Image (cartoon, helix red, strand yellow):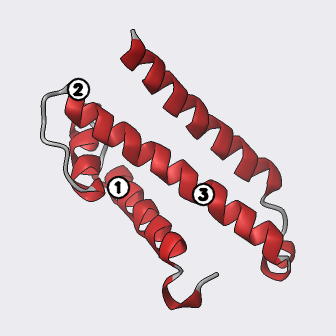
């Protein structure tokens, strides 16, 4: 029962982040000119992707697979959920962008 609650919590976090970003993204101009606004959106995006990678790791563990790095876990999730190649690529790109945002590579933020 506790495991199901954890999945539901992660899914609720994911839904909340998507709704927040959708409702608050604003215009390109606002995003580019308002640092507080853009940093808030970046943080929500980072946490959205972290929820996805957490779900991927949880799914791998629950299927008695070895939990590995995020990219390998996303491959396992894609296999489990029968995601097409394009969806898997997009999830991996999202994780890559999350890494860029977290580590502020190339002064992106």
Dot label at residue 45: 3
Q: Position of residue 91 (x, y in %)?
A: 40, 55
Instruction: Please tell me which residue is depicted at 36% across the width and 60% down the height of the picture.
Output: 92
From the image, state whether disc 1 or disc 3 is nearer to you: 3
Instruction: Please tell me which residue is depicted at 46% across the width and 61% down the height of the picture.
Output: 94
Q: Position of residue 22 (x, y in %)?
A: 74, 50
Kindly tell me whether residue 28 is visible in this rendering: no
Say if mark 1 contacts mark 2, CB within 8 Å. no
Q: Is residue 4 left or right of residue 74?
A: right
Instruction: Please tell me which residue is depicted at 45% across the width and 24% down the height of the picture.
Output: 6
Q: Which residue is mark 1?
A: 86
**Where 41 sits versus 107, above or below?**
above
N-term mark: 1 or 3: 3
Dot label at residue 68: none
**Where 24 sits versus 11, above or below?**
below
Q: Secondary structure at mark 2?
A: helix
Q: Position of residue 27 (x, y in %)?
A: 84, 68
Q: Secondary structure at mark 3?
A: helix
**Where 96 sits versus 29, above or below?**
above
Instruction: Please tell me which residue is depicted at 55% across the width and 59% down the height of the picture.
Output: 46
């Amino acid at each position: 029962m506790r495991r199901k609650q954890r999945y539901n919590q992660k899914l609720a976090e994911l839904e909340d982040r998507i709704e927040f970003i959708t409702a608050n993204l604003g215009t390109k101009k606002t995003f580019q000119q308002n640092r507080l606004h853009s940093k808030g959106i970046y943080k929500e995006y980072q946490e959205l992707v972290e929820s996805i990678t957490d779900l991927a790791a949880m799914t791998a563990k629950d299927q008695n697979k070895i939990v590995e790095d995020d990219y390998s876990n996303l491959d396992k999730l894609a296999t489990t959920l029968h995601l097409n190649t394009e969806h898997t690529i997009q999830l991996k790109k999202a994780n890559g962008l999350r890494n860029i945002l977290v580590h502020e590579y190339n002064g992106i933020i």
